[in-house]
Image (cartoon, grey):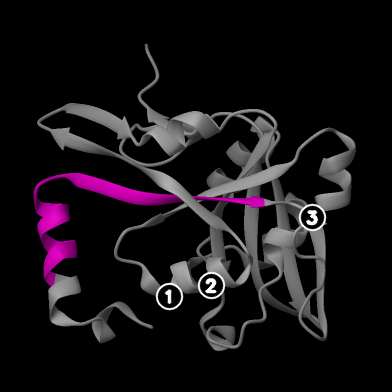
């Protein structure tokens, strides 16, 4: 569902949150072996910077600086293809990861963090994305047991999608921007999972 299709109360709440500087999310956790099948015809594989180069730009919400920085940190990109067409992608991190506004996030061991999930508009609503199921056998060999992600409180379509992937909501987390300062918070469930937002010290 596009943002403009959301009910008025949801659009109003999102606008208020933005104006008061509140970033609030629900945190989800899923066993990496809980879903193994991919949608018919979809091929999922790890892609590097060279393979992503043809897709840089606004159409795929990718830019060269982001790709270079993510790969330098050791993050991996898993992408889904239907034939030669890029359906979408997600990035997988195993350590602290920059978010927005100078805020970073991280999750506890032995979890991985899935972020920047993207599906091309032409394929949205067709349930073609199998990205979060990639790398699972590989990760399991290194002791990674769960995948953690967060979704903004107003993003109902993403919540429905992640529920289909057997993810469980474990709590909430976010931060509040007041002037130039940011105050991070999290629920007990997020704390137990080791997930947090934080501002790195200089």
Q: Secondary structure at mark 1?
A: helix
Quadrant where the C terminus is found in the figure: top left
Question: What is the x, y in percent for residue 5?
Answer: 27, 86
Residue that carries the numbered disc 3 in the rendered image: 33
Q: Label 3 to label 1, Cα distance in Å?
A: 23 Å
**Disc 3 residue crowd, few under 14, some 14–19, many 20+, Cα 10 Å:** some
Part of the protein shown in magenta? 12-30
Quadrant containing the N terminus in the rendered view:
bottom left
Count neighbours of disc 2 (C-alpha within 10 A) and say few if under 14, some if 14 to 19, many if 20 or more: some
Q: Earlier in the sequence, mark 3 or mark 1?
A: 3
Label 3 to label 2, Cα distance in Å? 17 Å
- Between disc 3 and disc 2, whose residue precedes? 3
x and y, in percent, of residue 51 in the image: 77, 60
Q: Are marks 1 and 2 in contact (CB under 8 Å)?
A: yes
Number of residues whose C-alpha sits closer than 10 Å to that of mark 1, classed few (under 14), some (14–19) or many (20 or more): some
Q: Is residue 137 left or right of residue 89?
A: right
Residue 142 drawn at (x, y percent): 85, 33
Q: Nearer the viewer, residue 176 or 144?
A: 144
Q: Residue at x 54, y 34 (%)?
A: 193
At x 53%, y 86%, the residue is: 125
Q: Is residue 7 magenta?
A: no
Disc number at residue 161? Answer: 2
* SS category of the residue bearing label 2: helix
């Amino acid at each position: 569902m596009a943002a403009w299709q959301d009910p008025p109360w949801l659009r109003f709440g999102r606008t208020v949150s933005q104006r008061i500087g509140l970033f609030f999310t629900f945190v989800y956790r899923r066993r990496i072996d809980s879903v193994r099948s991919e949608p018919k015809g979809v091929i999922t594989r790890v892609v590097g910077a060279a393979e992503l180069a043809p897709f840089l730009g606004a159409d795929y919400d990718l830019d060269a600086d982001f790709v270079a920085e993510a790969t330098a940190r050791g993050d991996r990109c898993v992408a889904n293809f239907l034939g030669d067409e890029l359906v979408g992608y997600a990035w997988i991190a195993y350590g602290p990861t920059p978010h927005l506004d100078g805020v970073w996030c991280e999750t506890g061991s032995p979890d991985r963090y899935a972020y920047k999930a993207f599906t091309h508009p032409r394929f949205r609503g067709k349930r073609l994305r199998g990205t979060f199921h990639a790398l699972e056998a590989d990760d399991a060999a290194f002791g990674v047991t769960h995948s953690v992600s967060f979704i903004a409180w107003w993003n109902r379509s993403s919540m429905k999608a992640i529920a289909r992937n057997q993810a469980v909501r474990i709590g909430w987390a976010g931060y509040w921007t007041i002037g130039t300062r940011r105050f991070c918070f999290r629920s007990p469930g997020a704390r137990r999972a080791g997930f947090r937002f934080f501002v790195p010290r200089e």
